[in-house]
Amino acid sequence: KSHPLIKIINSSLVDLPAPSNISSWWNFGSLLGVCLGIQILTGLFLAMHYTADTATAFNSVTHICRDVNYGWILRYLHANGASMFFICLYLHVGRGLYYGSYTLTETWNIGILLLFAV
């Protein structure tokens, strides 16, 4: 625990204070981050093999699914990850509205800016 990077990780993730009555509804913000990370990673790997030309776009998708190792799973992770991202987004905003998180105006306004960025 003497390394500065370990101290930062420990203080921000491990020793983070949390109320004892917290429910699973409060996980959707973290799940949004995980979904976004998956979308970025799978999108980068898919972009390596995708061709955006109108004549060869379909063939490049077929190439990804058939010829690239685990390309089919990357494609379906990317497609279903987008749906999961928006499901988590709506549940996260709905939870915030239900529990009155909008009373913390600074945090709420940052969340609204991020919502419009999506």
Image (spheres, rainbow, N blue to C red):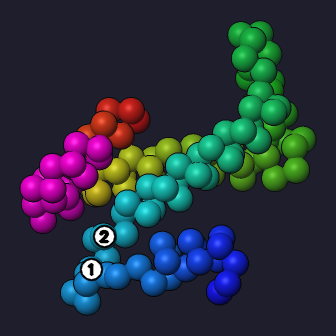
- CB atoms at circles 1 and 2 under 8 Å apart? yes
Closer-to-camera residue (110/24):
110
Q: Is residue 98 visible?
A: no
The stretch drawn in magenta includes residue 58: no
Closer-to-camera residue (12/103):
12
Q: Which residue is under mark 1?
A: 23
Q: Name the side, left or right, on which 99 lies relative to 59.
A: left
The amino acid sitting under disc 2 is Trp
Q: Is residue 39 above or below residue 3?
A: above
Magenta span of residues: 93-111
Q: Is residue 60 above or below residue 44?
A: above
Indicate the quadrant where residue 20 lies: bottom left
The stretch drawn in magenta includes residue 102: yes
Closer-to-camera residue (54/47):
47
Residue at position x 59%, y 52% from top? 37
Instruction: Tell me residue 59's x, y (percent).
Output: 80, 24
Instruction: Tell me residue 12's x, y (percent).
Output: 48, 72
Closer-to-camera residue (8/60):
8
Indicate the quadrant where residue 64 lies: top right
Quadrant in which the N terminus is drawn: bottom right
Label 1 CA crowd tier, 10 Å (few <14, some 14–19, many 20+):
few
The amino acid sitting under disc 1 is Ser
Q: Name the side, left or right, on which 71 lies relative to 83.
A: right
What secondary structure prevails in the magenta region? helix
Q: Is residue 58 visible?
A: yes
Q: Which residue is under mark 2?
A: 26
Q: Judging from the image, what secondary structure is the residue with disc 2 in?
A: helix
Q: Residue 49 shows which numbered tag?
A: none
Q: Is residue 28 above or below residue 18?
A: above
Q: Judging from the image, what secondary structure is the residue with disc 1 in?
A: loop
Instruction: Tell me residue 105's x, y (percent).
Output: 15, 49
